[in-house]
Amino acid sequence: MFAALTLLLPFNASALEWHNGDWQMHGFLGQGFTYTDHNQVFGTSRDGSLDFREMGVNASAKLLPNLLVSAQGIYRDTGGSDTLGTRLDFAQVDYSAPLFDSALVLGVRGGRVKVPFGLYNDTRDVLWTRPTVLLPQSIYFDTLALRQAMISADGGLLYGRYTYGEHRLNLEFMVAQPQDNTGGGPAFLTNIPNAQGELGGRPMFIGRALYEWMGGRGRLMFSVVDLDRDFHSSSPTTPSGNIKVMYPLFSGQYNAERWSLTAEYGWIDSQRSNTLPTLTKNPSENFYVQGEYRITSDISGVLRYDVFHLDRDDRDGKALSQLTGLPSHRFYARDLTVGARWKFARNFLLAADYHYINGTAWLNDKDNPDLMNGGGTSDWSLFTMMLSFRF
Amino acid sequence: MRQPNGFCFTHFPVMACLVDRTLQLFVPTLFRLQRALLLSVFILLPNTTLQAGGLKPVLVDSNGQAKHYSLETVREIFFMRLGSWPDGSPIHVFVLPDNHPLHVRFAKEILGVYPFQLRSAWDRIVYSGTGVAPTTVETPEEMQMRIKGTPGSIGYMGE
């Protein structure tokens, strides 16, 4: 695969477009390597795992100046946590109308659309748009079964953009059916291992508001997911029930020429009906603080502290540990990350990060079956590296 | 009120002596640190890095209308968030590669943003299917040629 990648080196970035850019094709191809000293992430990482691949191809066509049709297919493999293989990422029609001398733009998008949430969710499968190989896991779960439901959904989205001098406001509101019946979604949301049945009911609501100052030098964002799903069990031994999830997220970013400072803070408040097992009624706590420094336009470094507490009133996990008999490190994860990125050619990016992690809350039990019976190591290190090509 | 610390009182002469010694050692270091800090603030502050390229960038478009647009409209155009001109005709955007000195100056001096912000916005719309990327040309000469030959196009040149 690396040999194939090097063959693509002289590839021109702007080669795949027609009609002066009205028709375009783009894609990406990334191969990762993961090593952990304890616990497993993306395959058998204790021996060094190459089970981390992401690739995608998309096509966009501007049929009219303000009418855009686009679709993207993705292949992703991350060991036990993603076995879906090839999937349709988005397939959408977007129409927008500029008003008042283009100061206001109103638009509508429908089909399978990307979920607008936080700073990184929209394009999180592409290394080029992530600050590190592994996103802050407190907010962007990559090993848990909630992932596919957060990526894209079938429905529609209304948006508005308003610019006034150095101020810019962007509002999005989405109503869509999440893809929560794939990739272990029912088991994750019901808290029943291997739950047999289907999730349905009300589509999810998502809102996102962004304020930008000076063309994005300062950015403030608020996103919120409102999920209300009914679980219909197909097995006599498993109960049916209802799950409600509210996930607000506050984001802020400051971009200077050499450095960027980013932080996001949110919490997940989930309520399950009495028939479904409930671990805690308290909301979680999810946040990170991140600094990036651009040494040159092609080389940069990043430092981040990322924290996840499953129950914000039980940060050390002691109460939950007593309740479940599982070690307390299952209920929190604090991750100190140092990373570097190098764009060594226009279409090639090499990124690596080292994580020192205290806690195992965001590890999945497919790659770590011993977590189910009290195993797992509370203090561990993770090294991950990825080479990515894009056009 | 907290009670005064007994240890501090009984051992005051020893403490004072220690503090004095410590200060003697640390004050010069502190001054050095302060100088380093001030220096690094200058390095870290925006707008103080090297000026790129010799030519001053100016906005160019096929209709010769560009100078009438407000900064926020030009920004929206180069961030690829506007599909059409006020008369409804399509906009075509041309840019030079990210590291080209004229592109760097255009981003900073005309748009008031950094090239990495443009690239990050383009990557986001391209890989979420919510827009198209600008057309990248390799040289300013090619840019001028493409703008001349493409109705409704916009880019920049050096003066």
Image: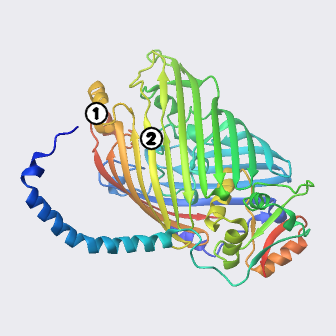
Asked if residue A7 is positioned above or below residue A265 in the image, the reply reads below
Q: Residue at x 85, y 67 (%)?
A: B67
Q: Position of residue A305 (x, y in %)?
A: 40, 52
List the residue tagged with mark 2: A286
Name the quarter where the N terminus of chain B is drawn.
Answer: top left
Name the quarter where the C terminus of chain B is drawn.
Answer: bottom right
For marks 2 and 1, the one nearer the N-term is 2
User: Along the horizontal axis of the image, is A246 left or right of A201?
Assistant: left
List the residue tagged with mark 1: A373
For the question of whether residue A364 can be seen, the reply is no
Which image quarter: residue A280? top left
User: Along the horizontal axis of the image, is A102 left or right of A131?
Assistant: right
Q: Amino acid at mark 2?
A: Asn
Mark 1 burial class by Cα count in 10 Å: few <14, some 14-19, many 20+: few
Closer to us: mark 2 or mark 1?
2
Q: Amino acid at mark 1?
A: Asn
Which image quarter: residue B65? bottom right
Q: Residue at x 65, y 42 (%)?
A: A209
Q: Residue at x 69, y 42 (%)?
A: A171
Q: Nearer the viewer, residue A130 or A286?
A: A286
